[in-house]
Amino acid sequence: MLPLNETMGQYSELFMLLAAGTYTVAFIAFAWDLANSSKMLQAVDLKANYSAAAEVRIPVAAGRRGGNDADGPEGRAERPTSGFTVEDGTAAGDMRYATERRVPARVAVALTVLGAAIHAAGVLTRALGAGRVPWGNMYEFLTTGAFLVAAVFLLALIRRDLRFLGTFVLGLAIIMLVAASVAYWTPVGHLVPALQSYWLIIHVSIAVLSSALFTLTFAMSALQLVQSHRQKTLAAGGPDKLGFMRLVPSALSLENLSYRINAIAFIGWTFTLMFGAIWAEKAWGRFWGWDTKEVWTFVIWVVYAGYLHARATRGWTGTRAAWLSIVGYLCVVFNFTIVNQFFNGLHSYSGL
């Protein structure tokens, strides 16, 4: 009979596999929603244009025929349309379609909730098997981080309709789970002495949550660049080759929301840096030692501080702000993958 920790570890891996499968189905549902919605909205545009053209042609033809009073101005004012109002071809029509008729999106959200519940069970059983918080190595950090990405996304849905982010957020969560299982899998085990501290709970939990928020803003910034390019193309009279982006807010709205979330995540990262320094003093007798991990944690802080400062006081808006936010997230990814795996130091706890 297997020991309890190994049994719980196996249950955890099974839950992670089921969560990844559920997220994949939800990912497909979100992608289907975007594709289906794009086709439906294009049909709305065609019908609205046809109705508008008919409204212009019918009065002229009636006037040339010298029709009766019903064809005159009063009759035209009372003549019913085909039941398809102009609003259906506007942003208001898009919004009504987005909120009332997107069945695949509602199914995708339900699947994401189910996947997050299974994922939570995987994180919990890993913790029970290890007898500690489940973020002591790269495998545990990625699996817990992926759970928080999905959880933060679902919590954000309570306040805002961010279903347009579903495909991109779940795609990142799936990548994190696959990377954890394929490249960073580590059996359940005890922590190295330096990590056996209550500061692990404080320091790493805030770092994981901040990273989850940065993941959301990375997706928003990437979409902002795409939406900005699309808006410029349409303004120049070009074709709309990215019809699904009609379900995504404007580039300015994405930028504003990303800025607010980045501000919250930056506060969390500031506490991550501060608590890490305090923990370093407790463990090694110094607050700062220019360890590679410490340096890159500070680099991330500087990049996001520069992003917030440049946007708030220097007018760095639009694509420049989006690119700076993306650079910050790439630094986060570099810090938690390349630095942990290939740079030797006091923070080499990847478990590999």
Image (cartoon, helix red, strand yellow):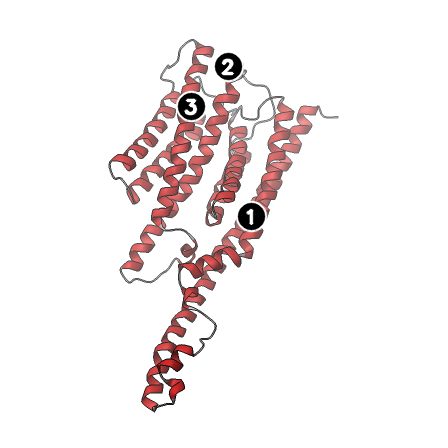
Q: What's the residue at 36%, 86% (across, down)? A: 62
Separation of residues labelled 1 and 3 (CA atoms)? 32 Å
Q: Nearer the viewer, mark 2 or mark 1?
A: 1
Q: What's the residue at 42%, 64% (across, down)? A: 87
- Looking at the image, residue 17 lies above or below residue 242: above
Q: Nearer the viewer, residue 77 or 293?
A: 77
Asked whether disc 2 touches disc 1, contact meaning CB atoms under 8 Å apart, the reply is no
Give the farthest residue toward the left. 314
**Residue 3 shows which numbered tag?**
none
Separation of residues labelled 3 and 2 (CA atoms)? 20 Å
Q: Nearer the viewer, residue 261 or 231?
A: 261
Tell me the SS state at disc 3: helix
Q: Earlier in the sequence, mark 1 or mark 3?
A: 1
**Residue 194 shows which numbered tag?**
2
Separation of residues labelled 2 and 1 (CA atoms)? 40 Å
Tell me the SS state at disc 2: helix
Tell me where residue 73 sits by quadrant.
bottom left
Q: What's the residue at 41%, 32% (across, down)? A: 264
| Residue marked by disc 1 | 109
Q: What's the residue at 42%, 43% (across, down)? A: 219
Q: Is residue 151 visible?
A: yes
Q: Earlier in the sequence, mark 3 or mark 2?
A: 2
**Residue 271 shows which numbered tag?**
3
